[in-house]
Image: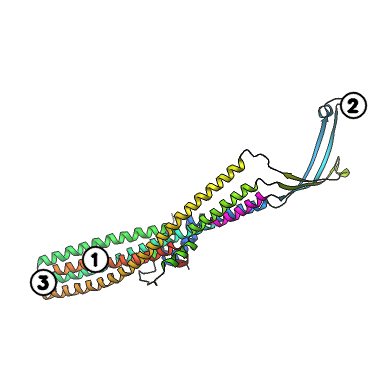
Amino acid sequence: MPKIPTNLSILFLLALSGGFAQESAPVKLTLKDAVNLALKQNPQVILANLGVSESEQDRLLARSALLPQVGGKATETVNRLNLAAMIGMSFPGFAQHVGPFYVAQGGIGFTAPVFDLTLWRRYRSSQIGVDSVRAQEVGVREESVLLVVSQYLGSQRAAADVQAAQSRVDLAQALYDQAADLQKNGVGTGIDTLRANVQLQNEKQRLIVASTQLETSLYGLARLLNIEPNRKIELADQVSFFDTPEVSTDQTLDRAYASRPELREILTRERRAELDLKTADAARLPKFSLNGLWSEQGLTPASAIPVYIYEGSIDIPLFTGGQIQAQRAKADLAIRQLRQQEQELRNRIALEVKTALAQLQSARTEVNVANLGVDLAKQEVGQARDRFQAGVANNIEVITAQDELARASDNQIAALYRYNQSRADLAHSVGQMEAVYAK
């Protein structure tokens, strides 16, 4: 086996490692980028888009039944007929059969519904069906955006927890170094150093837990975005506070009733059920249609002459075995069920809007209180360190202040997360998730 030169092998390894690094390069996403990516390649959104396309084809099929149908046909047949069997008797002196003889025929035929109200109502129903499926698609998009936003906010919270945990580890390390230095100089005690070391190990444990939570949260985000498992995600947005103006409950409810895709879907389904009821009534009416055939016919192609048939027919239903009554009853039951679902959905939307507004107001207040708590906790840690450094107190006060700062930091992170999640819940309750987070 030939030996590869050293310089070429090094270049090959560098190129190979560079290729791997390029494949596993992290995807840095803002919240807006994540939402738009989900709307582009989330499997549920793709399926919803295909459902809209399918409903459009159903509409075209229903429309085709209203249009004339024209077709061409050419035949060449060989015939041998039994005269006695066709007439029902035989004649002496005449042959029992005729043929065989050839018949060639080619032409076009058509059929056209002139008056059939049921076909028109079915076409209108298919148009409403498209609106219903589009409302379903919007609902799927709204739910997809909500899931992505919630997962992104959860990942932001996990990242903030990691950052806060790292800050607490750094502080605990500094306090441990301070206690060890005081003990070395004969000012501090061994118990103070041991206590500081225990606190340091506790903070490192919290950092490990927070890092694991961030990693698993990013995995969940990758699944929602349908990103390859070997690609890592980095969050480009930081946790921040966005103040929102006060909103009126009545105005918000009106927007929700006009925008929520679930309500729009039920309303379109009601319209379709009402049209089905009219379609059942229209089945009692006569139907009028035209049919025709024009062709060249002859025993040979050279002897063919034009022949044609034109007819108009009226179909009057007299007895349908209860079919029309059953269709009317079925449509009426569907209307009653949908109206009950509409009322229940309106009540649920109203409660969701009011709940989201209450949670948003509460979260806004929580953020203000949490920010003040962090400032006070930092002051407490500073004063406790100074007292310990001066020998006025042991580091129990410092450890206590550290715990208070950790609790205040957790409260601040949780308050910011609840505030941003409340904003998302309010946008979802009024059917504006895509409008707020994807534009």
Asked if 73 appears above or below 165 in the picture, the reply is: above
Query: What residue would you read off at disc 2?
Result: 94
The residue depicted at 20 percent of the width and 62 percent of the height is 201
Marks 1/3: CA distance? 23 Å
Q: Secondary structure at mark 2?
A: loop
Marks 3/2: CA distance? 137 Å
- Where, quadrant-wise, is the N terminus in this rendering? bottom left
Q: Quadrant of residue 23?
A: bottom left
Asked if residue 347 lies in the magenta stretch, the reply is no
Q: Secondary structure at mark 1?
A: helix
Q: Is residue 57 visible?
A: no
Q: Is residue 436 visible?
A: yes
Marks 1/2: CA distance? 116 Å
Apparent side of residue 217 relative to residue 280 in the rendered image (left or right): left
Query: What residue would you read off at disc 1?
Result: 407
Indicate the position of residue 389 as horizontal and vertical percent values: 13, 74
Span shown in magenta: 115-133
Query: What residue would you read off at disc 3?
Result: 393
Amino acid carrying label 2: it is Phe
Contact between labelled residues 2 and 1, with CB atoms less than 8 Å apart: no
Q: Residues within 10 Å of mark 3 (few under 14, many from 20)?
A: some
Indicate the position of residue 17 as horizontal and vertical percent values: 41, 62
Q: Secondary structure at mark 3?
A: loop
